[in-house]
Image (cartoon, rainbow, N blue to C red):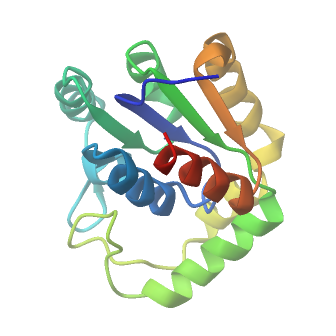
Amino acid sequence: MAHSLQRVLIVGPCGAGKSTFGFALAEAAGLPLFHMDRLNWKPGWIESTDEELRARLREVVAGERWIIEGTYGGTLDERLPGADTVVYLDYPIPLCFWRVLKRILTWRGRARPDMPEGCPERLDLSFLLYVARWNHGPRRRLEGRIGPYRDKMVRLCSSREAQCWLDSLARR
């Protein structure tokens, strides 16, 4: 299935590697990359209001070319219709959980490249529980929202599949 790759969403569980994949895809496709976490969070881990986040999203989605990485289920209805490709990183939750723990240890006390300055990585037990319970709610909600866009979807179930898909872009 050929996708035009001008307006791409990357979704999946926390720890799947959406940001890392987004950086690689942006480089391969020459598209600007927007991180939902950067659009949502302000320094000091202050969350944007719903209105602020949606205003920022409208501006990005109005563009002709973009990659938006991040699930943020409550905003998918604003992003899905304009996307020509939805990349779903559907990775096993034990792997995602491990990657989240590794990310916390690697970046602890510093902001990751996909986060705004002033939002240092930290241990957050409620976030770890959310990741651990992904298959018992968030997965179903996400798949329900992206289901109608199946014709635009690229579902990748491992890092190897993701790398093969990225490699295939270089051969186009």
Q: Position of residue 100 (x, y in %)?
A: 62, 72
The vertical placement of 20 against 85, above or below, is below
Query: What residue lies at 60% left-to-right and 56% top-to-bottom?
Result: 14
As drawn, is 75 to the left or to the right of 65? right
Report x, y in % for residue 131.
69, 58
Quadrant in which residue 52 is drawn: top left
Query: On the picture, is 12 further left or further right than 67?
Result: right
Instruction: Judge from the rendering whether residue 39 lies leftward or rightward of residue 147; answer left or right.
Output: left
Q: Is 9 positioned to the left or the right of 44 in the image?
A: right
Instruction: Say how many tags the image has.
Output: 0
Measured as percent of width and height from the top left, residue 118 is found at 22, 73
Q: Residue at x 30, y 71 (%)?
A: 119
In this orientation, which residue lies closer to the viewer: 169 or 78?
169
Give how far across and how far down residue 40 sits, in percent. Answer: 30, 46
Q: Identify the residue at image location x=43%, y=12%.
A: 81
Quarter of the picture holding the N terminus? top right
In front of the other: 128 or 156:
156
Q: Is residue 93 above or below residue 35?
A: below
Above or below, comparing residue 38 to residue 120 in the picture: above
The part of the image, by quadrant, that contains residue 110 is: bottom left
- Residue situated furthest front in the rendering: 171
Taking depth in this image into account, of 98 and 130 the one nearest to the observer is: 98
